[in-house]
Amino acid sequence: MSYIDEIPSDEESCFYAERLEFRLPVPDIGDEHHTPDLAPPPAPPIDDDALAALLPRCPHLTSATLSGIPDLSSRTLHVLAASCPHLTRLDIAHCPSPGLTDLALHALAAQALPLTALAVSRVQGITDRGLAHAVRGLPRLAELAMDELPLVTAVAVRDIWTFARGLRRWSLAGCVQITDSGFPWVPESDRLRSSVGAEGEGRTWLESLPPLILPGTHKLNALRELDLSHCVRLTDAAVLGVVAYAPRIHHLSLAGCIEMTDRAMHALCGLADLTVLDIGGLERVTDEGAFAVASSCRRLRIVDISFIPNLSDLVVLELASLPRLERLSAAGLPRLTDNALCFLAEHASELEALHLPFCIRLTLDGVRAILHRLASGNTQAGKLGELSLTGVPALRRRGIRRFSERAPEGYDERKQGAYREFRGEKVRALGAFLEKEEWRRREAERMNIPFVPRGDDSRALY
């Protein structure tokens, strides 16, 4: 039995309870009258002391989500580990309680051996010592989420590479203290690290850690998803270690790792099974590196190359040739032109979502071409159901706003650009409108009369 934001009502319900879930309250942002500064958050259905008293009566729990208990303590997690021998999933991510420390992970490592999924993201009291105990004491651990832990360094990451060989999903996004020293050493790493170190200031003790040399057979072959986004101190050397010792990754995020260059992109060419890749914000990457990834990783389905100013149409042309491309995000590319859109229209027949905000050189001709090919109701190949063109000057044209989704509250078009997000039937309606206006333009030219744009669906030339 499952209980979401409620507690079992009697002894029998407690005995048969298998899932408890107390999540953080999420405000309804769709409510126009929502005032987050004035409305206090709702009280949790149970506090830490009551939960500690309840858990011994729930011996069959297999999954617990306790993020919504603001005063959650390490003592209660100790009771959970001791009372629930079948616990396989625990989520305390984003819990604001200051009472959560490494002691909680020590208790789990000692008594919750069946645990396969652990989420401790944004729990401020977690350090290297707690994570080291967890990965050493949980032999079945397959999913680990440790995003935005300010006290975690390369020391904990080294232990994870060494002892958690069964991981399938691993997320450490926003761990800003993690460096290349936490990742396996490969021969080329020394040259890369020495070239980077020669440019910077004095090295800290974390950067002076000995290299993590693992046997050639010590690979994380089960690892399928890895999120390193916004680990801003990582360089190309970390990617080399990942590719060498986790060669079967399917999903990889390097967004915001601003120190990475084309060398990291060339290393990614060794991930033959890669299907999802996010390299948004890697300002040092050029056409050469991104093109190499697109031409080597032919199984890619979802790609994000947003806000990489050095990229041009060349990369999008190569991505369009991917046989399974479903989603492409290329926001903030100042060099992107209609040539890329036309090539996508001709070759990316499986494309379902396209995000091109702030690509200022795009015109209505390119938008019309891709909608005619990929979103037309008359073609079976048209699957495009999501199109984002916010901040594109050409989309300020009269009559287009009515097809867009409503801008979020507080959005200022004068500062942030025209809000143009199209979904579902509105994508096809936009395509029909642009086709109608193109017909009117051609008819006006044939009849040698001035063309005047219209904002409605009328085909009248005057």
Image (cartoon, rainbow, N blue to C red):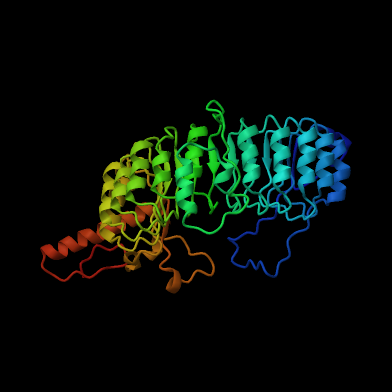
Q: Is residue 31 above or below residue 75?
A: below
- Observer-nearest of 310 and 31: 310
Q: Is residue 281 above or below residue 20?
A: below
The quarter of the picture where residue 131 lies is top right
- Observer-nearest of 130 and 193: 193
**Image quarter hosting the C terminus:** bottom left
Q: Is residue 310 above or below residue 88?
A: below
- Observer-nearest of 194 and 27: 194
Residue beneath the point at 81% across and 49% down = 73
- Observer-nearest of 281 and 63: 281
**Image quarter hosting the N terminus:** top right
Rendered location of residue 330, percent (x, y): 39, 53
Residue beneath the point at 59% across and 46% down = 172
Rendered location of residue 338, percent (x, y): 27, 56
Rendered location of residue 414, percent (x, y): 43, 74
Q: Specify the farthest residue to the bottom.
A: 414
Residue beneath the point at 45% across and 60% down = 405
Left or right side of 123 for 219? left
